[in-house]
Amino acid sequence: MPFESTNPATGAVLARFETLSDGALEERLKRAQAAFEQWKAVPIAERARLMTRVADILEADSDRLAAIVTSEMGKPLRDGKAEAQKSAKGCRFYAQQAEEFLKDEPVATEALRSYVRYEPLGPVFAIMPWNFPLWQVYRFAAPALMAGNVGLLKHAPNVPQCAMAIEGSFERAGFPAGVFQNLFIETDQAARVMDDRRVRAVTLTGSERAGREIASRSGRALKKTVLELGGSDPFVVMPSADLDAAVSTAVKSRTGNTGQSCIAAKRIIVANEIANAFLARFVGAMEALKVGDPTDPATDLGPMARPDLVSGLEAQVQATIAAGARVLTGGKRPAGMGNFYPPTVLVDVPDHSPGACEELFGPVAAVFRVEGIDEAIRVANNTSYGLGASVWTTDAGEQARFSKEIQAGQVFINSMVFSDPRVPFGGVKNSGFGRELGAQGIREFVNAKTVWVAS
């Protein structure tokens, strides 16, 4: 079955790519193993030189890469360019910091010498999503390759041109053949890759359902796994917050990437005493957004990536309304061509409805009123997910409680949640396990080997 690149704004098929045969896949796996045996011995300074070259290529090609991203998954051009530049930043960060993160760590013992050294595992299989088709891949690849591993990529089927561009960036930078390879493979072939003895680790960014399948299969094969799954992130606004900043950030967080982000502000939790003022501004700002052609610089929201995603979101919204929620704006899919959905605000959302207990992966905000900090924390934690949380308060005591008591992989105070190569990124509960980015990210796919030299 071929991989198709389809424009989500027009429905036009842009390109098709054939699936690898089983024989061709076996050759890629052989190449990965052979490349690892050589790459792990390459001095880290040389790895850094090549990774810096990738960063240079991404920066120089950011306009071209943005056009590919926009054409395949609908992101506005300026956002695609920003994603390419962020990917360059991630590559440059690990080129500069990997040696420090991976240096031998002395441990004080009675031995003559004792220390921990970090060694690569081997080929790492990455199953990556379409919503940030560049950044999601580079944030795995930069630390994994700098640690001495090699990468095998199964990208989402709707972004094949992005996958090829990523593979091409490593080739153009001068990485040895086989160190990073794109695989156009089907689900059954991916299962065989995970089972293959030469593949030593698996990383997935995707759905909770996919995470359970990958974790189960990797567990049976006793392979290290990092999972970054869904989120239903709370965005909490308390009375002391800067209301203008909170409103503008809530709009940006909920509608960025057309709402197709795991760390978007999906459940907005507002103290009752400021809820009316917040909602008036928030709804007005959502209604002012321009939805349309992602190549138009004036567009705020492009189309969603696939028709099935729009249909699924529409069904969740209608089920939430049927359960008793009210729509303050949006809520109806527009007629016409393209995978568009309007910015939508729901209130009076019942706890048992999709708007409260499922991830809404699109520009739909569910707003909840609370009486105080205790209820705010309870509602924030009332989810099976635990990826990120954004909290708006200038009260130091509230900041301390939220940062300690919210169940999430990251809590951002007076800021939207975002990923940054300098700090670890990941979740708890059904949002997955393991960490990407930071020092923790580069150490996920290494062997922390203890060395003890007796006196």
Image (cartoon, rainbow, N blue to C red):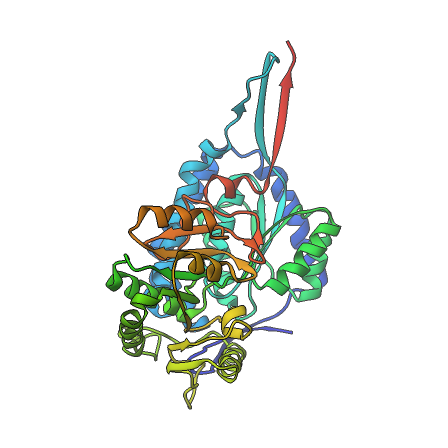
Quarter of the figure with the C terminus:
top right
Name the residue located 56 percent from the left edge and 73 percent from the top edge: 352
Residue 378 relative to residue 238: left or right? right
Note whether 373 is above or below 308 in the view shown: above
Q: Position of residue 35 (x, y in %)?
A: 61, 43
- Nearest the eye: 271 or 291: 271
Name the residue located 43 percent from the left edge and 44 percent from the top edge: 423
Residue 80 relative to residue 216: left or right? left
Instruction: Evaluate whether residue 54 shows in this view.
Output: no
Note whether 282 is above or below 394 in the view shown: below
Quarter of the figure with the N terminus:
bottom right
Name the residue located 61 percent from the left edge and 70 percent from the top edge: 18
Q: Position of residue 398 (x, y in %)?
A: 36, 50
- Nearest the eye: 1 or 125: 125
Q: Position of residue 382 (x, y in %)?
A: 52, 62
Q: Hey, which residue is sitting farthest top in the picture?
A: 455
Residue 222 relative to residue 302: left or right? right
Note whether 394 is above or below 384 in the view shown: above
Note whether 70 is above or below 96 in the view shown: below
Q: Position of residue 422 (x, y in %)?
A: 40, 43
Quadrant of the image occupied by residue 293? bottom left
